[in-house]
Amino acid sequence: MLIPLSLVGAEIGHPKLYAEIQEPRSWGGAQLGEAGWMGFRFLDLAVSDLREAPQVQQQVQQTTPSDGTLMLKYVPRTEAWGEADVCQVTLTPAGDPDNVVERRQAGNATVRFHRATWSDLPTMFHVVNALAGLPVIEARGAGTMTVSRGNKWSRDQRVLL
């Protein structure tokens, strides 16, 4: 099953990269995932040494206190270079009462971006290459694999400025 990554982001103004995301697969005790575009895989994810995480309440809990996600929603004006149709600062609150966690596992996570050329990813090779070029200074924390039902629809997003 392929899941496009940028479905909701266009309407609510979140930064996005389009990706085809394969269904995660299990191999050697790890959960593996990848993201690509038109056959070019630009991201590998893995969570290994999985173990059951402490039970969480029915709804998703934030691991760090946060009021939510602050974004700049910008839509350029057609035929008016440098002008905006929309330019707003928005806040999407952190809470998500519609998301119910069924299972959570913790483990060791790795992320790897693969460098791309213009012909691999014409509209975002520069973004992927910048991410691939970042040095990994130290591994901090662990990864989690969460199975949940529900989705944050961002109906609670509001304009701040």
Image (tube, helix red, strand yellow):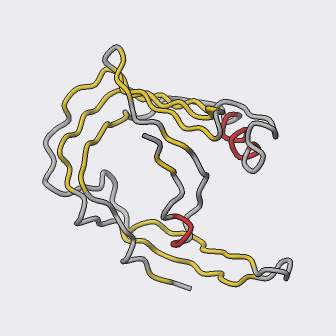
Specify whether 48 is left or right of 86: left
Can you give x and y, in whole percent of width and height, for residue 143 in the image?
Answer: 37, 35
The residue lying toward the viewer, choosing from 89 and 34, is 34
Q: In the rendered view, would you say 52 is above or below 7?
A: above
Q: How many marks can you see? A: 0
Location of residue 116 (image quadrant): top right
The residue lying toward the viewer, choosing from 74 and 19, is 19
Residue shown at the point (24%, 49%) measured from the top left: 148
Residue shown at the point (19%, 40%) measured from the top left: 103
**Quadrant position of the N terminus in the picture:** top left
**Quadrant position of the C terminus in the picture:** bottom right
Q: In the rendered view, would you say 73 is above or below 132?
A: below
Residue shown at the point (60%, 51%) measured from the top left: 18
Specify whether 38 is left or right of 34: right
The residue lying toward the viewer, choosing from 49 and 77, is 77
Can you give x and y, in whole percent of width and height, for residue 80 in the image?
Answer: 85, 82
Q: In the rendered view, would you say 92 is above or below 120?
A: below
Residue shown at the point (34%, 64%) measured from the top left: 152
Can you give x and y, in whole percent of width and height, for residue 29 in the image?
Answer: 31, 17
Specify whether 56 is left or right of 69: left
Location of residue 78 (image quadrant): bottom right
Can you give x and y, in whole percent of width and height, for residue 7 in the image?
Answer: 50, 60
In the displayed orientation, state which residue is furthest to the top.
28
